[in-house]
Image (cartoon, grey):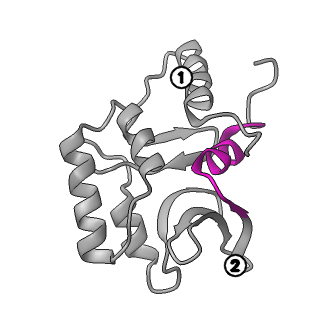
Amino acid sequence: MSTSPKMEATLERITEVCKMFNRDMQPAADDLVIERLQRECARRLKLQVPERYCDLLRLTDGVEWNGARFFAAGHPARTFPTVIEETITHRPWLPKLILGNMEDRYFCFDLETNKYQVYDLGYHKPCRCFNEFDELFAYAFEGRWPEGI
């Protein structure tokens, strides 16, 4: 059982901080956009989008805060990087579904191991592995709050 905060609680905290700085979150992805992402990932990449990541997209179509980000499903009207674009760009050397990044680390889902990974580009290997998406999400954002918040 994970002791990490739930993704929704972390996202709510990010939303509150963004409001303090008059910054909006990305709108939620609708079901058709998420279904298209799932279909395209299966067809083009032979990869499955984890359901818990789809839950994030239903709340916000991508999130970027304090140096870390998780990519969007790819609504045509938005310019936020998408899961498919980023995965295709890095696929020759990183055959995993790339969900986001932070500097030289990529947040991935490895379908072979069914684990979420933080892949370090400098070492060309995972530096952290998690069983649950919420653990990866907390790793990316918890502990990165501005002082006093």
Q: Is residue 143 left or right of residue 101?
A: right
Q: Is residue 147 left or right of residue 28?
A: right
- Report the amino acid beneath label 1: Thr
Part of the protein shown in magenta: 129-143
Q: Residue at x 27, y 57 (%)?
A: 37
* 117, 62: nearer the viewer: 117
- Report the amino acid beneath label 2: Lys
Q: CA distance from mark 2 to mark 1?
A: 32 Å
Tell me the element at label 2.
strand
Residue 56 percent across, percent down from the top left: 45, 40
Q: Is residue 8 left or right of residue 81?
A: right
Q: Report which residue position mark 2 lands on.
A: 125
Q: Where does the C terminus fall, quadrant-wise?
A: top right
Q: Residue at x 24, y 66 (%)?
A: 40
Q: Report which residue position mark 1 lands on.
A: 15
* 148, 6: nearer the viewer: 6
In this rendering, the answer to whether 24 lies above or below 53 is above
Q: Residue at x 38, y 66 (%)?
A: 48
Q: Is residue 38 visible?
A: yes
In this rendering, the answer to whether 149 lies above or below 115 is above
User: Farthest residue toward the bottom?
Assistant: 92
Magenta residue check for 111: no
Q: Main secondary structure of the magenta part?
A: helix
